[in-house]
Amino acid sequence: MLKPIPLTVDSSEGRAEIATGCKLVNLYAEQVPSSKKTPVVLIGTPGLVPFVNLPTAPVYGMIVHDGYLYAVTATNLYRVAYDGSYLDMGSVTITGKVWMDTNGVHIAFVDGKKGYWYRTETGVTEFSGEGWYPASTVTKHDGHFIFCRRNTGQFFISGLFDVSLDPLDFATAESASDNLVGVISDSRYVLMFGGKTIEFWYNSGDNSFPYERIQGGIVDKGCAAANSIAKTGSSVYWLGDDATVYRFVGYTPERVSTHAVENDIKRGRIDDAEAFTYIDEGHSFYVLTMPSQRKTWCFDSTTGLWHERKHRVFGRVPAGCHVRFGNMNLVGDFQSGMIYALDLNAADDNGTSISREVRFPVIYNGGRNMVARSIELDVLHGVGKISGKGINPQAVFTWSDDEGKSWSMEHSRPLGKIGDKKARAKVNRLGMFVQRQFRVSVSSPVKVVIQGLYVDMQ
């Protein structure tokens, strides 16, 4: 009897892996019209295409200002044009990931120790003076730059559409005795993220100091890492101090992580977590990396599903920061001067193959024996390249009968050379089992679209 195995749509390999154990690596689910043979397909995540290689490294932050891309490395600020040409705009001394924003006239950026501002007419200038303090984040709101003073509960602001700093222009988020972790502007409000609480502030227009806390605008949730705070559209995401990923719905924090994701996140250090968001072909992604764990998780808010992203060499993805520039989603490399474009048509990461894996749900029939005559992957065929790597792409099948403790030998089957639509990724004579879980991976640098897995069994 030919039986479809339910298609895995997210990674759920947590404490309950004996019951689930599903996994998606470098694949994500996408709904298709109801007229198709399956309601969901798995799409390969984008590859990395070089856009520009800056002479210094790494790329700590990027922003678009006056029609150009501005990128900060450890030692320099660069202005990059749409054709990839660049100019060195000045020297800096940066020791970690930066927060950047623009008020339309200036760019301000900070790394927790030093801060700089840039204006076309004057170049790069380091913040200094009595009104300046080391800041972990910076955001722009109603023409003011708002800085989160490191290791305190205070924030301070710049002049209106200016970078001047008055030593008296500061306030304290004091609903709890926790330090501020990060500050981000979200439409009408400014969100003050503390280690234990979050406060909502707004611009009241007061001449002495324009920002006030909203009455009752206090949330009893903390933030584990400033660099995990990221915004897309009307949603602000962050990694909570409880290793849970949240987003705001109005004033209410909504948990978006699953038990499996949370179980994985808290296996190691989380205070260095970093994230960015981007939108691609209708999908809105929150990409969360734990550098110390060499791990990257990705939440697709369009479907509400999680998947893993992995680099064959680094484990975590190379992307450390993101910006939308023209029609490109650009990411900066966390250890080199490369800026890449995320490209769904690219089948590798700048020459490094991408390993895509789906671990399907367990087949179980109440403890009764089953025999599998064959298994076949419903996948896009005929995707081989004209020459080089990927000329004869393969899908690799393995299976486990002991809840993932051990796996069978690998069985490679063709996805079809270019134009070969008759290729069949099929394995015959799989033997008897009581329960079984199938795993399929594709490492060939080709386009991958998986529609299903079918087993002929008795």
Image: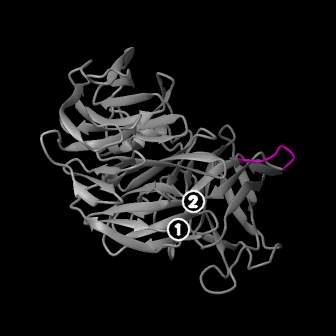
Spatial separation of the CA atoms under disc 1 and disc 2: 8 Å
Instruction: Name above or below for residue 283 compared with residue 197.
Output: below
- The residue at 77%/45% (across/down) is 39
- Tag 1–tag 2 contact (CB < 8 Å): yes
Say which element carries label 1.
loop
Q: Nearer the viewer, residue 181 or 7?
A: 181
Give coordinates of residue 267: x percent, y percent. 34, 44
Q: Nearer the viewer, residue 25 or 129?
A: 129
- The residue at 50%/59% (across/down) is 67
Magenta residues (range): 31-36
* Amino acid under disc 2: Gly
Q: Is residue 359 visible?
A: no
Give coordinates of residue 266: x percent, y percent. 35, 40
- The residue at 23%/62% (across/down) is 92
Q: Nearer the viewer, residue 420 or 49?
A: 49
Seen as rendered, the residue at the extreme front is 121
Give coordinates of residue 16: x percent, y percent. 49, 37
- The residue at 41%/34% (across/down) is 142
Instruction: Name above or below for residue 386 compared with residue 334.
Output: below
In this image, 71 relative to 434: left or right? left
Instruction: Name above or below for residue 356 compared with residue 236.
Output: below
* Amino acid under disc 1: Tyr
What residue is pinned by disc 1? 82
Q: Residues within 10 Å of mark 1 (few under 14, many from 20)?
A: few
Q: Is residue 301 magenta?
A: no
Give coordinates of residue 229: x percent, y percent. 39, 40
What residue is pinned by disc 2? 326
Label at residue 259: none
Q: Residues within 10 Å of mark 2 (few under 14, many from 20)?
A: few
Instruction: Name above or below for residue 179 compared with residue 280.
Output: above
Q: Is residue 35 magenta?
A: yes
Question: Residue 220 sits in which quadrant?
Answer: top left
